Structures are given as C-alpha cells and as structure tokens.
Image: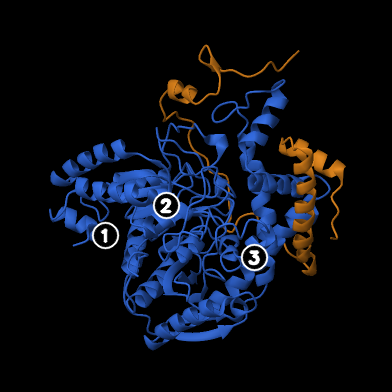
Amino acid sequence: MANIISDETIEYVGILAKLELSEEEKEQAKKDMGSMLDYIDKLNELDTSAVEPMSHVFPVHNIFREDVVVNGDDRENILKNAPEQKDGSFEVPKTVE
Amino acid sequence: MDLLSLTAVELSKKIKAKEVTVIEATKAVLNQIDKIEDKINSYVTVDKEGAIKRAEEVQKLIDDGSLTGPLAGVPVAIKDNMCTSGMLTTCSSKILENFYPTYTAEAVLNLEKAGVVIIGKTNMDEFAMGSTTETSAYGPTRNPWNTEHVPGGSSGGSCSAVSANECFFALGSDTGGSIRQPSSFCGVTGIKPTYGTVSRYGLIAYGSSLDQIGPVAKDVTDCATILETIASYDKKDSTSVAREDYNFTEALVDDVTGMKIGIPKDYFGEGLEPEVKEAVLAAAKELEKKGAIIEEFDLGLVDYAIPAYYVIAAAEASSNLARFDGVKYGYRSEDYNGLHNMYKKTRSEGFGPEVKRRIMLGSFVLSSGYYDAYYLKALRTKALIKQEFDKAFEKYDVILGPAAPTTAPKIGDSLSDPIKMYLGDIYTISVNLAGLPGISVPCGVDSKGLPIGLQLIGDCFKEKNIIRAAYAFEQTRSYTGPFDK
C-alpha cells in the first residue's frame, strides 16, 4: 500500500467530519482510506495541467429572485421533528460557558 | 386479465375507460405487498390507509373529469430519499429514523398533480451510497428474480418493487448508476435524465453535481411518460435547466433507420461476464437489423471515471451530510457531554459504515494540503471525460453498452471489498460525471436466470435518441417479470 494513513491524519479527519470513531473503526478507516487513495492515485497518470477544473457540466450562475415569502408558517410541524424543543425553539446543550 | 401485469399507462387507460377502479388497482398492489414483502423488503414504509384514502379521492377527480393525464390513478412507490410531506423519509438511515418532512419534493409533487397514488417509500442503500441495497439500516432488499441475490442499488427497493409488482412504477435517483444498475439487475427499465432536467428540490442530497431523479418502470413507454411528468424547470433548484422540449413521449417511435450507434470497445474488456457481453451485442444486432448503423470506437479515459467519481461524490457527500447534527430533526444521541460531543456521538451512532467511510474520504480530499491534489485533480479529470463524450457524440447519436459488468451478485458478496463493489459501476458512473442521459432496458437473462440490462447513453438533452432506440429494441422482445419464468 503506497498511502499510509497516520493516526494523526485519522484523528484530524475525524474532527473535520465530526465523527467519533472507536479504536477498531479507526484502524479500519486507516486501511480503507489508504486503499482508496492508492486507487485514486491512478488519476496522476493523466496530465491535467492545461485543464480547468469542471465543477458543473453546464455553466452555473447565480439565480436571483425577489425576496418574497411564499411558504406559510410551519413552525409547529417543523418542531415536531426536533429531538428536543423548548418554548417553541430547538433545544441544544449549553454552548457558552 | 392480470391487473398487476399491466404497465402504468395501460392501467391508467383502463381506469379512465371504467374497466377497473383506482381502489381496485391500489388494493391489488397492497395485496401483493402483503404476499411477498417479507421475502423482498422493497419498502421502508407502506402507507396503506393513506393510499386507499388517496385512491378514493383520485377516483372522484377522474370521474368528474379533472384528472385526465396518462398516469392518473396509478399506484407508485417513491425512493426514500425524496421528501414526502407528513410521510416518514429515512434515506434508509438510522439518523433519519423519525423524520417527517414538512414539504414534498418537486418531482413527487409533479406526480401528485398528475393523479398518482403513493403507496410508500422504497428501501435503498443508506444515503444512496452503495450498489446493492445492503447498506440500508432497515435490512437488505432481495432480488425478486432470486431472493439470494441483491437487487442492485442504490435504488434497489424501487426496482425490486416494480419488478415484483408491488407498485406500477417507482421513482429512483441516480448519482453514479443508482437507477440504471438496479434496473438491469431486476429486469426493469430506468432512465437517468440529463443533469438539471428533474428538480432536485426535496431530494436529500448525496453528490449534488451528479444526483438526478428518474423513472423506474416496466417499459420504455412508461418511462418516457413518467419523465415527461416529473421533469420541470424549478426556481427552487439553482441547477435546474429550462429545457426547450419536454415532449419525451414523442420519441416512442419504432424507427432507428440511419441512427448512428457507437459501441465503446473499452466497455467490452476485462471484468465483463461473457453472457452479459453476448446479450448486449445481440441487442446491438437487433438494432442493426432495424436500420441503425452500428460501429465500434475507442472511448478514452474509461478507467479514470471511478476514481474521479469517488473523490467528487465523497467530497460533496461530506459537505451535504454535515447538516445531520441532531439539532433540528432526526436521531440525537442519548448520551453526550456538551454540544460538540453531541454532534459527534449523534453522527457516529446515526450513520452506517459505508456513509462514514465516504464522509471521511470526502473530508480528507477537501482538507487543506490535499484539496488541489485530489479534489481539483478529480474535477480536471471530469472535464477530460466530458471532452471524450463530446467527441463521441460528434459521430454518434447513441452510445450502446452494458449497464453493469455482471448480473446481480449474491447477498453478502459485495460489501467485503469496497473497491471491487465500486468497479461494478464502471459503465454507469461516467454518464453522471458528464451530465448525460442514460437508460437501462432488459435485454436477456443469464444461465442463472438473472436479468441483463442494455445501457443506451445519449448526449446532453438528447433523451429522445435513447428513448427511440430503447423503444425500437423493446419491440423485438416481450416483457418478462420474475414470476413469468
């Protein structure tokens, strides 16, 4: 395997991805990511220096519209999906000390 | 007359001719679900009561002449990654085990306006990440042709439901082959439209630059009719394209005289099962007999599509799936310490292994220091792949090949080796990268009795070419379902 993923990298990616992996999952993730990157490295066979990155197939541009409310107040139904709610708001753990 | 063997368009005609009622059709489907669903598991949610109530409403609207369209009264299934107001929408993930959307996806809304009856939501690979429908948090779906085999994925539930007569048609979504490959494995017909044709509003995003909703049905006529119904320009989807022509059913003509069809040699190399190759080339012969001009050609860069796809799709997934944090909807961990730990615990407990694998990969390729080497490299490769197709479509109206290198693998055989599973997408994935339309139509059965799919690929906005070719080919054979054997 050409790509060796270090503990630090998996730790860092876990922070970016907001995932908490068990030791076992981390080992598996190191292996999986390494072999995926080995495979992805195939792209290096291509000379793309003169090619612009293509994020969308068709040209995309900003779509503007008038700032008009078209949907009604659906607060009650939206809050029904909340894992926890209080006084008509989403409830989350304390965020500031 | 066996009601369940009718196509959607045939059924709607019979309903309008008062030969059958919407309730009868709906109950027939619900009975079929009662009979075989424990063996197949096509659905995450079946809304019996809602469907019957809706069937009564639709019948009235047909009777009083307000619903006259070609799909009025038809019972359908929707892949569980499309929001349906008030109906559980899980994406086959634990993290959305209790999510009831407050709005309906635009494509589904378009179907509702046309007078369909929604039976329920179909099983899929979790967040559409997979090729077998085995990564669902609600158990695997089984192939109606042989329940020891997978139905393909990620729209496996939609394709198995159509194949097993558990609905008359279904909607699926296709990011790297998720409509065409399971259609091939289940012996049904499915279209992935040109990017931007069907609104993605209300489709729970996986790879936004690649995702498209499309029809899964028993034949090409149904697929063209459904596509015509769900396609629309939608201001709520900033990548929606206002097309000049939505009249897809116009292409249902049994005439391919002079049509130029290219067969990429690179699609018939190593890894392709001989029986699949034989069936696909036999299909090409049929089209040639009907007057099409068939030619082999070299389509470059075929081997680079999968690595480019996995970088792009994983990158977009890591960003799109950041919204699942246990705050506004869905699962929240019961045991956590503070806000950040709540996010982490919720996501770690709520997502399955394949989803985590892709989020990790996506976060990595987007991270500073790797962004240029991986993400931009993949986007540059995408541009080159698009150029290859542009060149091919200067010469050909349609590209013909297999939808998948094999027929449906056995349950449990694919997940052990992710890269091997990813390689199964080799013929479908580049179509998404280039934004092209593609259709999979049944073209035979292998010696194990499993269906084989023919893929026809068109240039952007040229759905009509592939619909015409698929329709003409379809006229040379008759539809066979898993129970007709």
Local crowd size for mark 2, using a 10 Å CA cut-off: few (<14), some (14–19), many (≥20): few
Determine the secondary structure under disc 3: helix
Chain name for mark 1: B
For image coordinates 35% across by 63% down, the residue present is: B218
Question: Where is mark 3, residue-wise?
Answer: B423
* Left or right: B195 as drawn, with respect to B483: right
Give the alpha-carbon distance from disc 1 to disc 3, as whole Å. Answer: 36 Å
Q: Position of residue B222 (x, y in %)?
A: 32, 61
For image coordinates 34% across by 64% down, the residue present is: B483
Three-letter amino acid code at disc 1? Answer: Val
Q: Earlier in the sequence, mark 1 or mark 2?
A: 1
For image coordinates 60% across by 81% down, the residue present is: B265
Determine the secondary structure under disc 1: helix
Question: Where is mark 2, residue-wise?
Answer: B39
Three-letter amino acid code at disc 2? Answer: Lys
Chain name for mark 2: B
Between marks 1 and 2 in the image, the one whose residue lies nearer the viewer: 2
Q: Earlier in the sequence, mark 2 or mark 3?
A: 2
Between marks 2 and 3 in the image, the one whose residue lies nearer the viewer: 2
Name chain B's colour: blue
Between marks 1 and 3 in the image, the one whose residue lies nearer the viewer: 3
Question: Where is mark 1, residue-wise?
Answer: B9
Give the alpha-carbon distance from disc 1 to disc 2, as whole Å. Answer: 28 Å
Determine the secondary structure under disc 2: helix
Q: Position of residue B318 (x, y in %)?
A: 67, 44
Tell me if label 1 and label 3 are in contact, CB under 8 Å.
no
Local crowd size for mark 3, using a 10 Å CA cut-off: few (<14), some (14–19), many (≥20): some
